[in-house]
Structures are given as structure tokens and as C-alpha cells.
Amino acid sequence: PRATAARFEGPRASATGKAGGASDAMLARRVVAGDDDAFPQLVDRHLARVLGVARRMLGDASEADDIAQETFLRLWRKAGEIEIGTGGLGGWLYRVAANLSLDRLRARRPSDPGALEAQTVPAEQGRALGDEQMRRGVEAALQLLPERQRLAIVLCHYEEMTMAEAAVIMEASAEAVESLLARGRRALRK
């Protein structure tokens, strides 16, 4: 039986799930058949974006590497069960990486729920910061957002997905994603 959670015609999965050769679906079939060259091609095709989502969600490159490894391990194990649409594997991989990142975040809940307010920077001071300092400040503030708000911002702003694409990955409505984005943006502005 096909895994229903794996049904997804993913956004931005290298446009058609192809990158100068075999489609994601063809490569997945080759993985199942035992082709040693197919799996590394899938990893090369999707690793950077999976790592990007995990790094921005977790704020830690080492943890993001762990998430990416687990994401691709699940792909290896379930390659024969995944229904790959015309968009390729990208959406399925994003969903797995996002869910694993959320699980990791929930396991390390911050002890201070008011931490976001304690970390705010006055507007006049923020304008004086250099670009690199500003980027680091935004990344730090992003880590203080509730997980779902952070995921919505990562998917829509950093990964440049539409609200509809993010909604599919987050298993929410586009309206819920819009609300999460609005709350996340307000918190980041503070």
C-alpha cells in the first residue's frame, strides 16, 4: 500500500523533479531496484534545500546535518512507497525535514517563554547595525519564534514558496499559514 503522507506533488523540486537527466520518480525506482548510483543523485539534487530548511528551523548546522541525514535515510527506506508527482520528491523531503525539525524543537523547548521579549533590539539600534549583524539578529530572533511561525517564515520567505505550497507541507490551510506569517512577522519586528 502507498503511504498517504507521501502523496505530494512538491513545490520547487527542481521544477520537474529532473536535473539534467532522470526524473526523481525514475531515480527512486532505481534505488528500489538496487542501483547504487541512483540514491547519490537524489541526495545531490535535494540536499541543499533540505539542509536550508533544517538550518533555519533549528539554528544549528550540526543538528541540521542530523535532520538531513534522517530525511534521506527515510527516503532510502521508503523509496518504493512514495508516490512521486510531476513536481518530484522536493515536497515530500521538505515535509519530512520540517516535521523532524519540529520534533527536535519540541524536545528542546525553551525554559523561558518570555525569551522573545527579552531579546528585542530597539529600532534605532537595529538601523545602526551592519548587514551581517542584522542578518545574525534576524536569525537569532527567528530561533525564538514558535515552531509553526518559524516554519511558515522559513518556507515562504527563505525558500520562496507560495502560501499554498507551504500549506501543503505544513498540512494546514493557506489562511492558517497567512496567520502564522503575520504573527511571526509582528514578533520579528518587535
Image (cartoon, grey):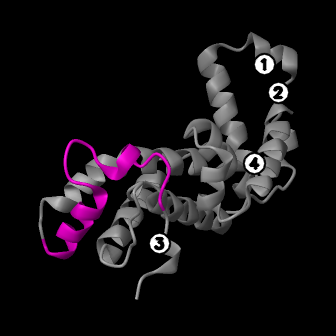
Distance (Cα) linking label 3 and label 2: 41 Å
Q: Secondary structure at mark 3?
A: helix
In the displayed structure, does residue 128 sit left or right of residue 14? Answer: right
Locate residue 99: give its quadrant.
Answer: bottom right
Residue matched to label 2:
121
Q: Residue at x 29, y 54 (%)?
A: 43
- The label shown at residue 145 is 4
- The label shown at residue 144 is none
Q: Mark 2 or mark 1: name the one nearer the start of the chain.
A: 2
Q: Is residue 32 above or below residue 42?
A: below
Report if the CB atoms under discs 2 and 4 are less than 8 Å apart.
Answer: no
The outermost residue toward the bottom is 1
Distance (Cα) linking label 4 and label 1: 18 Å
The amino acid on which the numbered mark 2 sits, given as a three-letter code, is: Val
Residue matched to label 3:
6
Report if the CB atoms under discs 2 and 1 are less than 8 Å apart.
Answer: yes
| Disc 3 packing (10 Å; few <14; some 14–19; many ≥20) | some
Q: Secondary structure at mark 2?
A: loop
Q: Residue at x 40, y 66 (%)?
A: 70
| Disc 2 packing (10 Å; few <14; some 14–19; many ≥20) | some
Screen quadrant of the C terminus: top right
The amino acid on which the numbered mark 4 sits, given as a three-letter code, is: Leu
Q: Mark 4 or mark 1: name the one nearer the start of the chain.
A: 1
Distance (Cα) linking label 2 and label 1: 6 Å
The amino acid on which the numbered mark 3 sits, given as a three-letter code, is: Ala
* Of the pair 21 and 102, the residue shown nearer to us: 21
Q: Residue at x 62, y 62 (%)?
A: 102
